Image (cartoon, rainbow, N blue to C red):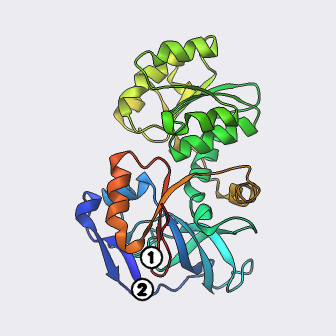
Amino acid sequence: MKTLRFHEYGEPADVLRLEDVAVPNPRAGQICVRVHACGLNPADWYLCRGLFAGDLPRGVGLDVSGTVEAVGEGVTDVRIGQRVLGVPDFRGFPSAGASDQAVLAVWTPVPPGLDLVDAAALPMAVETACRSLDILAVAAGHTLFVYGAGTMIGFAVVQMALMRGTRVIAAAGNTFAERLRALGAEVTSYADDMVERVLEISVGAPDLILDAGPISGVLPDLVRIAGGDGRRVLTVSNHGPVAEKLGVRNSFEGELRYNVLTDFAKLAAEGRFIVPVARTFLLAAWRKALDLSLSGHAHGKLVLLPAGATARD
């Protein structure tokens, strides 16, 4: 089978290779699927640079939808031929989701009415968004400011917070501003006076702040919006010394929330939740997808498709 993986750490464009490897066999408690679609995330490029370092080679692609081809010992909740979405065992195998076949460590059935490409956009955004909201204990009656609401995790956070009865103020660019307003968020831009505008909209400091944006330099401003209390701010994208110095919390603190995938897959099938897909690429065109992702102008989820599929713009 074809798989996209790296044999050394470095910049993804330098270390990733599309290679022929043997089809992996699922271990106990796992399944192997024929991949229909694989969602890409910034986390994939961090894996190439050494995030969660371990044995090499290692694959990329942490979001998958596909059809079950084999089940490991003890698996009784799925059958061969069933459509599922889930998360590959990227630490236990030398390949991951950007492959013709993948071994999944976590899965849930794809409900009727949910396209497999849209299904592949869900796992990481759903899990990370839910976990982050839980760490902050976001609840009805709170005012939450989401910085980076146009990222896929940020977009998921806004939807989930609104479902909890939370008032949401969202900072986003033009691509998703109107869609966020239609959901019920109060939207502002990333202009230089963002701090003042958020405080004006919120009528004082919002209760909680979630940073899903790619710009690390924004953390001091977010702490200012929080009235100087870094513990009311959580970042999913800007971990490191600056966050630690400011007392900002991070998304690694909580327990994984893959148990919510089933519910949000059903909501997505009903049209009540979405992680927007911007473009699809054939697996062989992975470099184009990488370049677009790294450009910061993807404007939605990018999805890889194995051979035989048809890409869509």
Q: Quadrant for the N terminus, please.
A: bottom left
Marker count (numbered): 2
Given residues 10 and 137, the one toward you in this image is: 10
Asked which secondary structure carries label 2, the reply is loop
Q: Which residue is mark 2?
A: 1
Which quarter of the figure has residue 187?
top right
Residue furthest out toward the front? 313
Write the residue at 48% across / 82% down. 308
Mark pair 2, 1: CA separation:
7 Å
Residue 59 is situated, as x and y percent measured from the top left of the image, at 39, 70
N-term-proximal mark, 2 vs 1: 2
Residue 188 is situated, as x and y percent measured from the top left of the image, at 54, 24
Given residues 276 and 1, the one toward you in this image is: 276
Q: Amino acid at mark 2?
A: Met
Crowding at mark 2 (Cα within 10 Å: few <14, some 14-19, many 20+): few
Q: Is residue 47 visible?
A: no
Of the numbered discs in the image, which one, if any, rests on residue 275?
A: none
Q: Is residue 62 above or below residue 71?
A: above
Q: Is residue 18 left or right of residue 96?
A: left
Q: Amino acid at mark 1?
A: Ser
Write the residue at 45% across / 80% down. 307
Contact between marks 2 and 1 (CB within 8 A): the answer is yes
Q: Which residue is mark 1?
A: 99
Asked which secondary structure carries label 1, the reply is loop
Which quarter of the figure has residue 116?
bottom right
Residue 114 is situated, as x and y percent measured from the top left of the image, at 69, 64
Write the residue at 46% across / 87% down. 23
Q: Is residue 84 visible?
A: yes
